[in-house]
Amino acid sequence: MSRARRARVGLAAAALGLAAAAHSQTGPFTEAQAAAGRSSYLANCAGCHLTDLRGANEARPLVGPDFMRTWNSRTAQELVAFLSVTMPPPPAAPGSLGAQSYVNLAAFLLHANGATPGASALTAASTVTIGSIATGTMSEAFRAALAAAALALTAAAQQSFKVRLRPVPIEASTAANTTGAGEATAALAGTRLTLRGNFAGLKGAATAARLHQGAVMGVRGPAIADVTVPGATSGAFTAEVTLTAAQVEGLRQGQIYLQIHSETAPDGNLWGWLVP
């Protein structure tokens, strides 16, 4: 090997060594801060930027080459400041998560992009350059921990309810026509309610079904959503309904009931309250 070639190889090796050294130093954040930031991210950011941080539509990726092109030469201080004035986006209130939450989110993003937690806590005034500690590559261990945390959060957020459908005599004169029985289960994930149930023994074919919200359990209230059921005296049904925040709270307080109407009992044939 010629002297010139040896010199080029030596320079290349030195450059690689310097790059490795630059990324081997621990980041100015702790494992606890990154874990807290992960919880904040899943609760407030994953809906737009996705669980794996890859982004979608207007929500830019928060990991990988795109993130590093934007933040490679900028500081952790700038990242914290940017998050605090942009997240969560309108109609929510940017800056509403609290100062420490934005510091933790920055720690989480640094960790996601390959930076290694250390003993020093991140602060909003940290001037470390992001490119000196992050590579833009998410480790497999980080990816697995993130997926497990997201799965646990989804399981915790989902609630189950059951419904026992029984006749609803509106008036004594119509009591003979309100026969039958049924049952259903309901699963709430966020604001999405999924109903699955069946009924049988109606004197007349079912004509409609609705969810209602009363002031308290046992007290009738207005309809809040339609539920499609078979037009028969028996059958099975499945429905998905998006609830408002107030309706979700009402569901948790036992205010929501399902009512099925029939040809022989148009004012209500079967009803049942959704209970945990």
Image: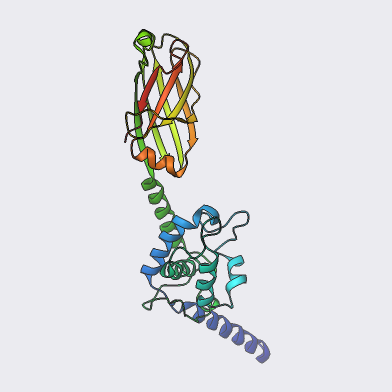
Q: Nearer the viewer, residue 100 or 32?
A: 100
| For residue 138, above or below residue 265 | below
| For residue 36, above or below residue 186 | below
Rendering colour mode:
rainbow
Q: Where is residue 245 in the image (x, y as percent from the top left)?
A: 45, 44
Residue at image location 59% in from the left, 58% down from the top: 59
Q: Considering the image in quadrants, where does the N terminus appear?
A: bottom right
Q: Nearer the viewer, residue 203 or 2?
A: 203
Left or right of 13: which side holds 158? left
Task: Place residue 190 in its image quadrant.
Answer: top left
Task: Place residue 170 in its image quadrant.
Answer: top left
Residue at image location 58% in from the left, 73% down from the top: 71
Residue 132 makes an appearance in the image: yes
Residue 141 makes an appearance in the image: no
Q: Where is residue 55 in the image (x, y as percent from the top left)?
A: 57, 57
Residue at image location 47% in from the left, 80% down from the top: 125
Q: Nearer the viewer, residue 34 or 136?
A: 34
Q: Considering the image in quadrants, where does the C terminus appear?
A: top left
Residue at image location 53% in from the left, 78% down from the top: 75
| For residue 186, above or below residue 50 | above
Q: Where is residue 127 in the image (x, y as percent from the top left)?
A: 50, 82
